[in-house]
Image (cartoon, rainbow, N blue to C red):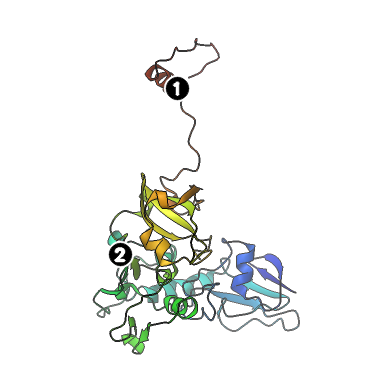
Amino acid sequence: MAKVTIDDIEIEVPDGTTILQAARMIGADVAPPAMCYYSKLATTGGYCRTCIVKVEQGSTKDPRPMPKPVPSCRTTVMDGMVVRNNTSPEIQEARAGIVEFLLINHPLDCPVCDQAGECDLQNLGYKHGAEATRYEFDRRTFEQIDIGENIKLHMNRCILCYRCVKTCEQITDGRVHGVLNRGDHAEISTYIEQAIDNDFSGNVIDVCPVGALTDKTFRFKSRVWFTKPMDAHRDCDKCEGKVAVWMKGNEILRVTGRKDEFGEVESFICNTCRFEKKSVSDWTIEGPRKINKKSVISANHYEETKKPTYLYDRVQLLNDGKKLPEVNSKDNG
């Protein structure tokens, strides 16, 4: 076991734990943001650099600081290590620069993007983004393409985090898409005359941190904060069948995997559950999904119904043809 101090909070973690994992054990408020790392996918991390931290003390044996910020998703802790994330102005400034690079080619089309309201880059841009860009060159532009029957690819929005590639490599029968070309011409695409078509391909939508991969069955139907996310399950022979259904009235607009406080799915779901089961009768609705109060999705989402007012109670009784109770002086309705 190793003791590590992150933002003045000490925690003991197993050997081999990364700084990011240790920070997440403390809590979401301490953990650095991550755009490419995904704990349920092997070999992710190290691409976006948004999770960089400052190591003030390497270890008890070697207390020298590390000379530059390090990616917390790829750096393992050592006993006695002291790390700065939110409490380091240097890291906050560096992270703002990283966000500026991520936004160089990313169009600010949040008003028409289906990912709005649950976009990691939107959150980073709000916290670290500048009011105006310093980039004066032409942005990269691509045509929108269908890379599957129910998946739309907006390459303009892609930040090349590789999550979708790792997902198809590790949880599907075979990967038919990847990063083509190099440098400024790099793009996510399918191989010639191929399309993503397997039982778990829809999970690339859930792992995408931006709006580059979207659900065609949900496109432009509603904003997420106008829907009510509910936990639901069904008997499924392909996956666990535990999902979040996003409802508007009695209609299910979309189905996604259940995500934890770090935006990662608890379990991957199959395409049958995601795209084909859109009737309430297909699911056993468990109840409202717990949403982080800081999230815009929490708007219009109530886990408990407020108790009706005194006047409302009396009107309901009259409507039901019942006799009103006598007014008590203690009533303050």
Residue 19 numbered mark, or none = none
Quadrant position of residue 177: bottom left
User: Circle 1 is placed at which residue position?
Assistant: 313
Inter-mark Cα distance, 2 to 1 = 44 Å
On screen, residue 181 above or below 133: below
Quadrant position of residue 64: bottom right
In the picture, the quarter occupied by the N terminus is bottom right
Task: Residue 221 in the image: state x and y as whole percent.
Answer: 29, 55
Nearest the eye: 122 or 57:
122
Nearest the eye: 11 or 277:
277
Q: Residues within 10 Å of mark 1 (few under 14, many from 20)?
A: some
Residue drawn at x 45%, y 79% as measured from the top left:
173
**Mark 2 element type:** loop
Residue drawn at x 30%, y 77% as measured from the top left:
135
Q: Looking at this rendering, what residue extends furthest in the bottom direction?
A: 182
Quadrant position of residue 131: bottom left
Q: Earlier in the sequence, mark 2 or mark 1?
A: 2
Task: Residue 210 in the image: state x and y as whole percent.
Answer: 38, 68
Q: Amino acid at mark 1?
A: Asp
Q: Residues within 10 Å of mark 2 (few under 14, many from 20)?
A: some
The answer to whether residue 268 is seen in the rendering is yes
The answer to whether residue 125 is seen in the rendering is no
As drawn, is 257 to the left or to the right of 142?
A: right
Task: Residue 118 in the image: state x and y as whole percent.
Answer: 41, 60
User: Circle 2 is placed at which residue position?
Assistant: 216
**Mark 1 element type:** helix
On screen, residue 265 above or below 329: below
Q: Amino acid at mark 2?
A: Lys
Total marks drawn? 2
Nearest the eye: 79 or 310:
310
- Of tags 2 and 1, the one toward the viewer is 2
As drawn, is 230 to the left or to the right of 226?
A: right
